[in-house]
Image (cartoon, grey):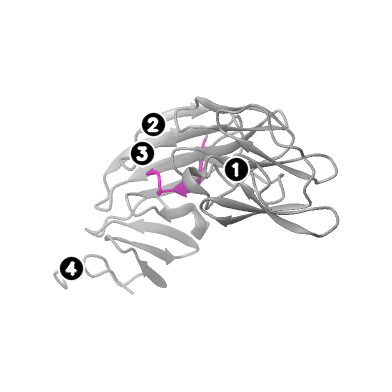
Amino acid sequence: YALVDRKAEIVTPFIYDKIKLFNRGGALAYREGSYYFLSSTGKEIVPVYNEDDIKDTKYFIAVTYRNAENRSDKVELYSYDGKLINTYKGYQMFHFTWDDKVASIKNRDGYIMVDTLGNKISELNVRSVSADGILDYGLNFHNNKAVARKSDRYGVIDVKGDIIIPFNYKRLDNLLGTEGENVYVIRDENFNEGLLMEGNPQPTSIKYKKLYCYSPFFIKGEGSDGREGIISLEGKELT
């Protein structure tokens, strides 16, 4: 296979075993056991050995390089025409949250947050939160807020690292879908749940078996006896 540009001109030799086109130009190509980012002009970027190490972010291409021990060594960000935008040594591109037009690049201590131009916004010494509360999949920002983990405690930060909710909780999740999305669910050691609102450091009673987003303005709560009721965003039981 070879790469053809938008003018239907062949810009690479017919040397690739497979080519996967990117939406905004360029492609992921494979030959002789290595993967390459091919720019829109046919320029071949230094090879990597894992297909997942070349990511199309819709704003630029992120290439993760690994050392002899297969550990990520650096991340390079490229424009679609093959120009180097930025290099972040010792980091691995991990997660994109373009709702807030930021991406997180992970290292041993935390993250560097970058914007859609590939420029650094901040350095955050926190860990992310996964569904199991253990694995580190990347910071998931929404409305400029993300639940994060520090020293096995959970809190909420913004993209610049300013603390919105202190890291005081053993488990904390955003209740997405509520008005303003400023409501969070906290859990204790017995998996009982309670509500926590931004700006109010005192949570509701941690007594519910499960809390759900019922509508943008109401929450459904399930008690230990299986009975359900409706709760306001302020934590008041209505039914």
Q: Quadrant of residue 236?
A: top right
Q: Amino acid at mark 3?
A: Asp
Amino acid marked by disc 1: Arg
The numbered dot on residue 6 is 4
- Secondary structure of the residue carrying numbered label 2: strand
Callout 3 secondary element: loop
The residue beneath circle 1 is: 71
Question: Looking at the image, do the residues carrying marks 1 and 4 touch, with CB atoms under 8 Å apart?
Answer: no
The quarter of the picture where the N terminus appears is: bottom left
Whether the magenta-drawn stretch holds residue 95 is answered as yes
Q: Residues within 10 Å of mark 3 (few under 14, many from 20)?
A: some
Depicted 41 relative to depicted 74: above or below: below
In the image, which residues are magenta?
91-101
Which numbered dot is residue 120? 2
Does residue 211 sit above or below 14 in this rendering? above
Residue 147 drawn at (x, y percent): 58, 38
Between circles 1 and 2, the one closer to the viewer is 2
Could you say which is closer to the camera, residue 11 or residue 53? 53
| Image coordinates for residue 72, horizontal then vertical, percent | 55, 42
Can you tell which quarter of the image residue 55 is in? bottom left
Name the mark nearer the viewer: 4 or 2.
Answer: 2
Closer to the N terminus: mark 4 or mark 2?
Answer: 4
Amino acid type indicated by mark 2: Lys
Of callouts 1 and 4, the N-terminal one: 4
List the single residue furthest toward the left. Answer: 7
Q: Secondary structure at mark 4?
A: loop
Q: Residues within 10 Å of mark 1 (few under 14, many from 20)?
A: few
Q: Earlier in the sequence, mark 1 or mark 3?
A: 1
* First reached walking from the N terminus: tag 3 or tag 4: 4
Does any portion of residue 16 appear in the rendered image?
A: no
Mark closest to the chain's N terminus, 1 or 2: 1
Q: How many marks?
A: 4
